[in-house]
Image (cartoon, rainbow, N blue to C red):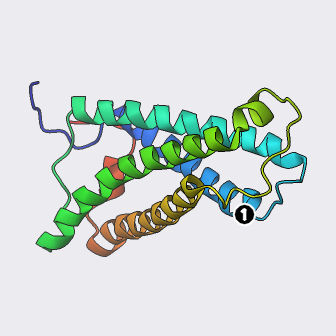
Amino acid sequence: MKTVPVSRYHPLLVALHWLLAVLIIAMLCAGFFLLAPMPNIDPRKIGILLVHMSLGMLILGLTVIRFIVRLLTGKPADATTGYAALDRSARLAHYSFYLLVVLMAGTGLATAILAGLNRSVFQKTGEALPATFDAYPTFMAHFFFALILTALIVVHVAAALYHQFGRRDRLLRRMWIGRRL
């Protein structure tokens, strides 16, 4: 692949970044603040799980597409903080997003299989949800990865704001639609 210096990420990569940001934050909020406190005997929970599980698979698919686009398109030079350790951790953090989304989807799917959610949620057989999902180790992993993903998002946003307003290096410009050269 021919490498040409660019000042912005590919428009598809940018669009997927912002779409995934909204979807992932919405899903984390739905999981923590809507699904978690709702008892499994609440009849509304099955409908919410249907949306949650469907969007989870959509997020996984879009993340895979985004990863492929990232590998195949030119990207701007790495942003620097002036601290080598922080610069190295930024690359690790970005790849961690991909890994955490895969782990979230995998543990969510595994929990759905173990709990028989295909029948109760997607086939609408009328079967009750399990009394609790806490009994499934895959669900506990799903929750744990959600906490890590939430923390990573907070650090990511703080780092972006530091670059934009502290270092004044116009970092956010790179992750927006516009002329790339």
Q: Nearer the viewer, residue 44 or 8?
A: 44
Above or below for 108 versus 2: below
Above or below for 153 versus 83: above
Q: Nearer the viewer, residue 121 or 62?
A: 121
Above or below for 164 versus 97: below
Residue 89, picture quadrant: bottom left
Res 114 visible: yes
According to the picture, the residue beneath numbered tag 1 turns out to be 33
Res 81 visible: no
Q: Amino acid at mark 1?
A: Phe
Residue plotted at (52% across, 41% down) = 19
**Residue 124, percent across and down?**
83, 30
Instruction: State which quarter of the image contains the C terminus.
Output: top left
Q: Nearer the viewer, residue 173 or 152?
A: 152
Residue 80 relative to residue 149: left or right: left
**Residue 75, percent across and down?**
21, 40
Residue plotted at (42% across, 64% down) = 152
Numbered label tally: 1
